[in-house]
Image: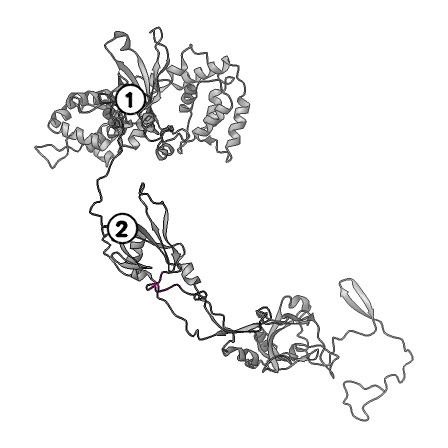
């Protein structure tokens, strides 16, 4: 008989449900896997009836499966177990701390032990992740969250673990599930670990002096002192010049002797090798005195299988005092194995070391004693006079060696002023010859001054049908100043770069030249280095001009107030007016180069173009058509290759390199004139699309230009006027002149109208 679950289990309330049944077929029940998929069951699925209570009340279980709801979540417990140890001294067991992880998604567990260095144990994962069944008599189920809590002792595969703590997430999760979590329990102490805390006296102490701290702190730091040893009391004794090195890393010293030349003694003499110098020396130390330990006795004759005892108290060891850094200073007398050495000076690093560490401020050097018969007169080498063969440096080399050597160059100056890209460090001046011969008066020259070795070269610009050809007039060489004695033993003076400026007269190998112009690079370089070129120093020039115009300032203002009005805010004084004013009042005190410097500094930035853009384009088209050049597409491809950002602009030097690589059939001066007429952006980069349109002979062609000498007509020496603009800013010039009227010194000159004042402010 079967009992009805709704009736109490009492006698008389049970009855057989099959009484009166005629059909005994089995009902068909279907379980649902997911929508549209079912399978046949023996009985209806009324829930998972387990023999232990669930963590959720009936009807409130989560709808999501646990492998989704608790994915990546686990409970962490800290536990320990006691392990018996048979072979360890004074300890019968040891305590091992482990971490127990319970994974909520599938109910698996893992036990791991944190690794400890030099523990001698196989630590790490002690039990891999798996479902662990409970021990008998409840082995039919597995460990769950209700079986793991602080204070419980789960038995896992014969080993009992004591749970003592859990993490914050585990405590919060169990409390929400209605499980009370006790307070943490203290882990018992390991007897072996406690035993090792007490220091034991070793039978064979390995005593080593730790010098690594000083080595790391003072490595490569050496104190250098200068001193002497007076040995004049002995026969043939001298005063030895010594150099003392003190190494801070290990407190060792070494002494070197500076032997003068031709003294009859070996040079580079090591006076004392590097060692720890004792203060008091009586005898040499026996062998083994520097060892850190003392051996008392040795057992067995065979040292390989014997053993020895070490004296832990170092009985009989003698400590010798050595020199330290606090005993070395200027004036100190140190005893180096019986030799009295006096310290006279120290280097800069040593002075700073004693100033910082010991607070010393007085570093007055002492003088080295001299013998009474010592000759202190410095004997200079006699150099014979120059004989005129070769240069002075070549002849001087024959006086110092039997085998002549080439003269040494100033390598530092050579590296600083060697050619770097477009910066050639060569100053070019146009000059004319000053001569009584009528044929030489019209001859023009280009004088190049090389800054790397102060050499000078002269190139003649031969005028057509003048009888003089275009060629090198003087090769590159240093030129001596005129009117000085040559055949002497003193080195003559040579021309320097600051001797060359516009308006100067120079005598180069008995030819007199007057410099009448300079290229833009020379003017700019002299202005950037105005400390070496006073003719390009605008402050010195304005000071000289201020002193010249101060007595005649009223006359100067009245005469030059009628200036050209360019716009409402800027007044321009023509360059011819400026040059006329300086020549009238300076009376030769202001040179032509200084006048050009003033004009360039106060330029209105309206440079007069000697050749228009269309004229230069006609010359370029003429050269391209004459040479049948048709590689414009290849040139465009090369320019776009260098323009990685596709901006349409490239630096001038890059475009110049590409043009030279494309073999443009044009002169260098024509290429530079072309680049001067190409549009540029604010950064100074050129628009190469404008260059391609400029050189395109098929689109908007121009008629051929009349034949001219391009190399002569387009370069800087062909310009009649200097590169200083069409005029100067009158308001800025008068403001920087800063001359007050003597009648009313508190007021500015009346020539400055409010617009000029506002402009200069």
Looking at the picture, how far across and down is residue 673, in whole percent? 40, 21
* Residue denoted by label 2: 235
Element under label 1?
Answer: loop
Q: Is residue 84 left or right of residue 13?
A: left
Which residues make up the magenta segment? 277-284
* Residue denoted by label 1: 387
Residue furthest toward the front?
235
* Residue 119, placed above or below residue 687: below
Q: Residue at 49%, 16% (x, y): give it.
A: 624
Element under label 2?
Answer: loop
Which quadrant is home to the C terminus? Answer: top left
Q: Within the magenta stretch, is there residue 1? A: no
Q: Residue 677 got which mark? A: none
Q: Choose mark 2 or mark 1, whichever is in front.
A: 2
Which quadrant is home to the N terminus? Answer: bottom right
Looking at the picture, how far across and down is residue 239, in whole percent? 27, 50
Q: Earlier in the sequence, mark 2 or mark 1?
A: 2
Q: Residue at 76%, 75% (x, y): give it.
A: 46
Residue 554: quarter of image: top left
Q: Within the magenta stretch, is there residue 282? A: yes
Looking at the picture, how far across and down is residue 2, in whole percent? 83, 86
Q: Which is nearer the eye, 746 or 712?
A: 712
Q: Is residue 202 visible?
A: yes
Q: Residue at 35%, 14% (x, y): give it.
A: 461
Q: Which is nearer the eye, 157 or 184?
A: 157
């Amino acid at each position: 008989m079967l009992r009805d679950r709704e009736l109490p289990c009492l006698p008389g309330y049970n009855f057989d449900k099959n009484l009166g049944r005629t059909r005994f077929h089995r009902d068909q029940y279907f379980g649902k896997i997911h929508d549209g998929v079912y399978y046949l069951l023996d009985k209806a699925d009324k829930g998972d009836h387990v023999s232990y209570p669930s963590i959720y009340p009936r009807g409130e279980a989560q709808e999501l499966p646990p492998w989704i709801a608790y994915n990546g979540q686990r409970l962490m417990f800290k536990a320990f177990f006691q392990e018996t140890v048979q072979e360890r001294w004074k300890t019968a067991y040891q305590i091992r701390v482990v971490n127990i992880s319970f994974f909520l998604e599938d109910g698996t567990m893992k036990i791991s032990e944190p690794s400890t260095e030099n523990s001698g144990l196989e630590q790490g994962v002690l039990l891999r992740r798996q479902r662990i069944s409970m021990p008998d008599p409840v082995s039919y189920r597995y460990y769950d969250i209700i079986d793991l809590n602080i204070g419980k002792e789960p038995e896992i595969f014969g080993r009992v673990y004591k749970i003592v703590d859990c993490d914050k997430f585990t405590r919060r999760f169990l409390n929400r599930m209605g499980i009370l979590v006790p307070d943490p329990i203290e882990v018992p102490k390991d007897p072996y670990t406690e035993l090792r805390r007490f220091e034991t006296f070793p039978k064979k102490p390995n005593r080593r002096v730790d010098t690594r701290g000083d080595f790391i702190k003072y490595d490569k730091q050496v104190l250098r002192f200068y001193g002497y040893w007076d040995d004049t009391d002995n026969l043939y004794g001298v005063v030895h010049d010594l150099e003392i090195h003190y190494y801070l890393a290990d407190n060792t010293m070494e002494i070197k002797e500076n032997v003068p030349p031709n003294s009859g003694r070996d040079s580079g003499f090591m006076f004392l090798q590097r060692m720890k110098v004792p203060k008091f020396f009586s005898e040499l130390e026996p062998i083994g005195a520097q060892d850190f330990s003392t051996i008392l006795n040795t057992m067995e004759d065979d040292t390989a299988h014997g053993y020895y005892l070490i004296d832990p108290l170092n009985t009989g060891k003698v400590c010798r005092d050595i020199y330290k850094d606090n005993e070395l200073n200027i004036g100190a007398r140190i005893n180096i194995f019986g030799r009295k050495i006096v310290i006279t000076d120290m280097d800069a690093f040593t002075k700073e070391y004693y100033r910082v560490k010991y607070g010393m401020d007085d570093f007055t050097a002492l003088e080295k004693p001299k013998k009474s018969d010592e000759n202190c007169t410095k004997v200079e080498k006699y150099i014979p006079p120059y004989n005129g063969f070769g240069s002075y440096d070549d002849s001087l080399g024959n006086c110092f060696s039997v085998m002549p050597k080439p003269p040494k160059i100033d390598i530092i100056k050579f590296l600083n002023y060697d050619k770097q890209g477009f910066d050639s460090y060569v100053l070019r001046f146009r000059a004319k010859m000053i001569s009584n011969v009528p044929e030489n008066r019209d001859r023009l020259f280009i004088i190049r001054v090389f800054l790397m070795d102060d050499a000078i070269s002269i190139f003649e610009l031969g005028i057509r049908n003048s009888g003089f050809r275009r060629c090198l007039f003087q090769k590159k060489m240093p030129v001596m100043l005129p009117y000085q004695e040559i055949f002497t033993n003193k080195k003559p003076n040579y021309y320097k770069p600051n001797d060359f400026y516009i308006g100067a007269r120079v005598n180069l190998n008995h030819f007199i030249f007057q410099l009448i112009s300079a290229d833009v690079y020379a003017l700019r370089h002299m202005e950037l280095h105005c400390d070496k070129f006073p003719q390009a120093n605008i402050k010195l020039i304005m000071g000289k001009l201020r002193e010249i115009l101060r007595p005649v300032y009223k006359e100067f203002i009245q005469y030059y107030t009628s200036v050209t009005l360019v716009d409402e805010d800027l007044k321009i004084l023509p360059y011819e007016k400026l040059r006329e004013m300086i020549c009238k009042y300076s009376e030769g005190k202001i040179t032509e180069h200084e006048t050009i410097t003033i004009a360039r500094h106060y330029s209105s930035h309206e440079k007069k173009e000697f050749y228009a853009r269309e004229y230069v384009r006609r010359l370029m088209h003429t050269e391209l058509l004459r040479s049948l050049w048709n590689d414009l597409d290849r040139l465009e491809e090369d320019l776009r290759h260098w323009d990685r950002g596709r901006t349409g602009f490239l630096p001038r030097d890059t475009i110049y390199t590409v043009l030279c690589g494309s073999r443009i059939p044009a002169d260098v001066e024509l290429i530079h004139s072309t680049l001067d007429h190409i549009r540029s952006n604010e950064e100074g980069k050129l628009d190469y699309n404008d260059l391609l349109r400029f050189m395109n002979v098929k689109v908007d062609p121009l008629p051929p230009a009349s034949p001219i000498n391009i190399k002569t007509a387009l370069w800087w020496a062909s310009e009649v006027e200097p590169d200083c603009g069409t005029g100067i800013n009158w308001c800025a010039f008068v403001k920087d002149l800063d001359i007050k009227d003597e009648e009313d010194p508190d007021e500015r000159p009346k020539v400055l109208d409010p617009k000029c004042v506002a402009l200069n402010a």
